[in-house]
């Protein structure tokens, strides 16, 4: 365990050192993050300004959903995306062979090898926006609601990671799948707004087919004490299930991986 | 998009198309035009064939650009309240139309160009007897051809969820038909919108001569494009809510003319500034084109200085 933590530390410091070469990117990332925030809040305000409450949710609660979405998108850009993008490359170029030879779990190696600091502005903006929305609540959330919301966000991160890694594992069979990641991210964008605001067919799609509702809507509802503990349980169960599936699929994939040279 | 560039050399003569190298140049304006048209047709055909190879990628890509269909699910519920500029029926049709427009205005020339500059693969194109712009432009057109069946399928899917969009509501019965004149104008507007988006990105791509990761700059134009083009909300809603100043301010940017304008043409009964729309589109294409040519000529000197 200690060895793994030490290795992650090394991976990340090396990644940060490599990325620091492109310092101007920080301002670009911050600028892009703020523009996205402005655009999202404007789109939300167009609904509420005309007197339509999304799914019957008050303004600040919808804003909290947007905050959680921004946070998750930042985590995705910082921790998940940079690693995911590499797996395809390793498979295509045969570098996966070298990784399998390392005295370390290959899924762990592939999932933690890189970190991109350019997602951090989004993480910070997301936390600030959510914090601001929570402060505007009529009464502060109870301790249990806060814990439940944090658990919900944590399981959302696990779901995001596992879905991405499942796509990575599939690349072992089909090699090129960059656009599948893009398609998944585009559909998850629905989580920017509370899921109850969507038309019925969309609500079914974004809850049971794609777990968008578990990502942003459920944690915020738990925080607002809307008695959705069953949903939180569902979110946890989904997270554990999909993590286990990603593990199983990776082992299957390695079983049929025949190296680049053979 | 790096794979798209493999094994393709648009300057290579093909049996039924381009003239043999060294053959006498066409004489007279009519022959010149015929020659250019034939080149365009052949290159588009070649690129279409090339893109068919990537059809699964293109299907996933069509899903990746389906944001207007997601917004449709949100706005159709909102419009039912009757508090918005577009009524329920117009809202459904508008967002389906925006989706279609979006599909035919996707540009990725920046990534392609960045790859060609950074890897030095731009060099062979400089020797070809045709400006590389044509190659980049026509490969997009070829890709749009491949996209056609997927767009039809996704529109069909949206119509299954919203059958009213096609056949009309009880309050406003009637099949969705913008009329031939308006439809023809919409097709032209979609093409010009694509040219706007393409040349906007192409001008930005020229910075690849100076910076190593020009793709990092893309969000600077992409994020305002997403929010102000009408993909996330109809631009006219701004006028109703914040007044004329907000609406006019957004119309001064190039973005609403890339999606909101052509999509509104496809929705019968929605008022659009037609003359202003086409004029603005042409002006912006001109601006981006001049900018691109300027940066291209300066950048090319820099590129050859790298020893290419």
Image (cartoon, coloured by chain):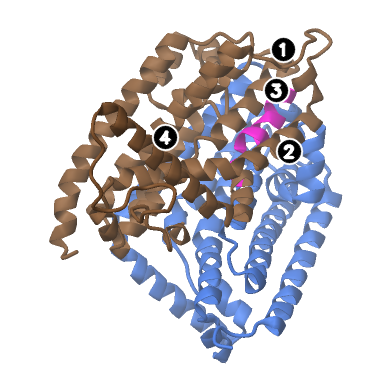
CA distance for labels 3 and 2: 19 Å
Q: Is residue B296 left or right of residue B85?
A: left
B234 vs B193, nearest the viewer? B193
Q: Residues within 10 Å of mark 2 (few under 14, many from 20)?
A: many
Determine whether the residue tagged by mark 1 lies in a helix, strand or loop: loop
**Whether label 1 touches label 2, CB < 8 Å:** no
Q: Residue beneath label 4, please?
A: B197
- Taking the spot 75% from the left edge, 29% from the top edge, the residue there is A55
Q: Are marks 3 and 2 on the same chain?
A: no
Q: Residue beneath label 3, please?
A: B92
**Whether label 4 touches label 3, CB < 8 Å:** no
Q: Nearer the viewer, mark 4 or mark 2?
A: 4
Up the image or down, B144 lies above or below B257; here it is: below
Q: Residue beneath label 1, please?
A: B82
Please check the rendered image and state whether residue B230 is part of the magenta-colored stretch, yes or no.
no
Residue B203 percent location from the top left of the image = 30, 40
Q: Which chain is brown?
A: B
Q: Residues within 10 Å of mark 3 (few under 14, many from 20)?
A: many
Magenta stretch bounds: B64-77
CA distance for labels 1 and 3: 13 Å
Q: Residues within 10 Å of mark 1 (few under 14, many from 20)?
A: few
Q: Residue beneath label 2, please?
A: A195
CA distance for labels 4 and 2: 31 Å
């Amino acid at each position: 365990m200690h060895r793994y933590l030490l290795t992650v530390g090394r991976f990340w410091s090396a990644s940060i050192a490599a990325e620091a070469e492109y310092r101007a990117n920080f301002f670009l990332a911050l600028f892009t993050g703020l523009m996205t925030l402005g655009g999202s809040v404007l789109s939300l305000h167009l609904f509420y300004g005309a007197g339509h409450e999304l799914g019957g949710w008050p303004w600040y609660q919808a804003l909290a959903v947007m905050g959680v979405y921004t946070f998750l998108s930042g985590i995705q850009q910082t921790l998940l995306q940079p690693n995911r993008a590499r797996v395809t490359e390793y498979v295509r170029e045969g570098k996966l062979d070298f990784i399998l030879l390392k005295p370390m779990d290959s899924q762990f190696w592939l999932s933690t090898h890189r970190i991109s600091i350019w997602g951090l502005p989004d993480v910070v903006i997301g936390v600030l926006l959510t914090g601001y929305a929570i402060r505007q609540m009529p009464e502060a959330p109870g301790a249990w609601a806060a814990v439940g919301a944090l658990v919900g966000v944590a399981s959302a991160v696990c779901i995001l990671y596992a879905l991405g890694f499942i796509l990575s594992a599939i690349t072992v069979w089909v090699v090129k799948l960059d656009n599948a990641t893009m398609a998944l991210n585009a559909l998850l964008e629905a989580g920017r707004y509370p899921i109850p605001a969507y038309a019925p067919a969309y609500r079914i799609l974004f809850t049971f087919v794609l777990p968008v509702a578990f990502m942003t809507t459920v944690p915020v509802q738990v925080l607002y004490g809307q008695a959705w503990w069953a949903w939180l349980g569902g979110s946890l169960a989904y997270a554990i299930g999909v993590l286990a599936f990603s593990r199983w699929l990776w082992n299957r994939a390695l079983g049929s991986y025949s190296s680049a040279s053979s | 998009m790096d794979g798209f560039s493999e094994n393709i050399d648009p300057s290579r003569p093909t049996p039924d198309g381009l003239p043999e190298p060294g053959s006498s140049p066409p004489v007279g304006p009519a022959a010149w035009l015929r020659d250019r048209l034939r080149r365009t047709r052949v290159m588009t055909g070649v690129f279409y064939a090339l893109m068919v190879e990537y059809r699964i990628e293109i299907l996933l890509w069509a899903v990746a650009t389906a944001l207007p269909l997601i917004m449709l699910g949100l706005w159709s519920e909102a419009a039912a309240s009757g508090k918005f500029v577009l009524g329920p029926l117009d809202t459904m049709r508008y967002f389906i139309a925006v989706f279609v427009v979006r599909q035919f205005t996707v540009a990725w020339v920046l990534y392609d160009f960045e790859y060609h500059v950074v890897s030095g693969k731009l060099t062979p194109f400089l020797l070809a007897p045709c400006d590389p712009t044509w190659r980049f432009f026509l490969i997009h057109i070829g890709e749009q051809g491949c996209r056609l069946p997927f767009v039809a399928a996704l529109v069909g899917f949206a119509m299954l969820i919203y059958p009213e969009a096609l056949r009309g509501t009880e309050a406003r019965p009637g099949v969705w038909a913008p009329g031939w004149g308006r439809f023809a104008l919409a097709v032209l507007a979609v093409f010009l919108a694509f040219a706007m988006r393409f040349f906007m990105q192409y001008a930005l791509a020229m910075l690849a001569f100076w910076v190593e990761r020009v793709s990092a700059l893309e969000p600077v134009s992409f994020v305002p494009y997403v929010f102000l083009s009408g993909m996330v909300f109809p631009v006219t809603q701004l006028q109703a809510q914040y007044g004329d100043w907000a609406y006019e301010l957004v119309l001064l940017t190039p973005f609403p003319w890339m999606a909101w304008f052509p999509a509104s043409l496809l929705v019968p009964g929605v008022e659009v500034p037609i003359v202003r729309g086409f004029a603005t589109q042409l002006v912006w294409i001109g601006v981006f084109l001049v900018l691109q040519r300027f940066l291209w000529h300066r950048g090319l000197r820099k590129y050859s200085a790298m020893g290419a």
